Amino acid sequence: MAKSTPTLDWANIRLGDDHNWWVEELSDTVHWDVDGLSIIDPRQIDHIVELCEPLREYGLDLDNIDTAFIPFRIDKDLGNGRVRLARVRDSFLESEEKLFALPDVVDEENGPYADFLDQITRARVKMLNDLFDFEQKLTVDEVEDQLREEQSNRFMEGKAVHLFEEVIAILDYVPEGWEADDDAPVKAAAEEEDEFPDIADDEDEEKLKGDASLRWDDDEEKKDGEEKKLDDDEDAKAAKGDDDDEEDEDDEDDEDDDEDEEDDDGEKKPAPKARRSRG
């Protein structure tokens, strides 16, 4: 196996126009063919580990990542988008250093990287069958056939397939017509809705109506009614007071008129003086 070959100590890589890294030269020229060989950068391997985490529930062993990829760290910058990498013995799952990951593809059919692809495919299929209610269970063969067809189409177009894209195509795979923004547990959400059925039946409604703590609307309406009645009573009293004042003023005016009439009718005129007789 190439991973145990002591002569694989360093790698020269270059940044491609697609912003992916490609291998130019390896220290082991016996077992490796660098023609079209790609290498996964630290950001990409971190993303792969993140997407593999949920698959542990479906039988994936994350230690297989350390088996399938050979770790390298940056040794020096060679200029013009080229970098020299040095091989290390760290784990992708435990190391805090930014590591490049070279897929072990010396044996493309049965090697560690090929086994890793098979394992994540099986785990992904189990997850999809658990999350989605397919009419027929999804199979590993169906997924592999579809991915292989897409890869062949790219080769026919003269496009090189970076190994990061090959891994992500599996980890992000969803059958056509079942695409989703993410792999949220759709099935689990539906089951959760069933666990909390509609409580608006007659019996429960009566219980809710009888619950004094839920009758704040009635209390508010009653309070508003009492306040409105109080306001109406005060308005009525005020209106009555105004009428009484007007009646008092009218009575005073009538008394003044009566007094004036008595002055006119009851005034005594002086009696005429008697004439003296001439004698």
Image (cartoon, rainbow, N blue to C red):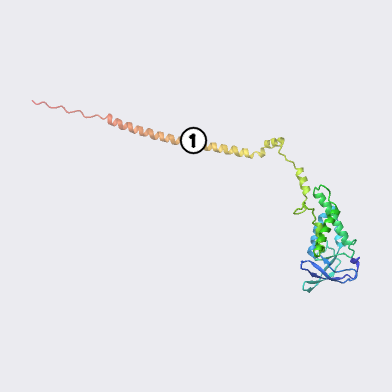
Residue 53 vs 136, above or below: the answer is: below
Image location of residue 273, percent across then percent down: 17, 28
Residue 28 vs 215, above or below: the answer is: below
Residue 215 vs 105, above or below: the answer is: above
Tell me, yes or no, if residue 59 can be seen here. Answer: no
**Which residue occupies 46% across, 36% down?**
239
Image location of residue 226, percent across then percent down: 56, 37
Q: Nearer the viewer, residue 160 or 130?
A: 160
Quadrant of the image occupied by residue 2:
bottom right
Residue type indicated by callout 1: Ala
Image location of residue 169, percent across then percent down: 80, 58
**Which residue occupies 84% across, 56% down?**
145
Q: Give the total number of marks visible in the rendering.
A: 1
Tell me, yes or no, if residue 223 can be seen here. Answer: yes
Image quarter in which the N terminus is found: bottom right
Quadrant of the image occupied by residue 76:
bottom right
Q: Badge 1 is on which residue?
A: 236
Q: Secondary structure at mark 1?
A: helix
Residue 183 vs 229, above or below: the answer is: below
Image quarter in which the C terminus is found: top left
* Apparent side of residue 200 relative to residue 224 in the rendered image (left or right): right
Seen as rendered, the residue at the extreme front is 156
* Apparent side of residue 166 relative to residue 212 in the rendered image (left or right): right
Q: Nearer the viewer, residue 9 or 246?
A: 9
Seen as rendered, the residue at the extreme bottom is 79
* Apparent side of residue 277 relative to residue 153 in the rendered image (left or right): left
Image location of residue 144, percent across then percent down: 85, 56
**Which residue occupies 45% across, 35% down?**
241
Q: Residues within 10 Å of mark 1 (few under 14, many from 20)?
A: few
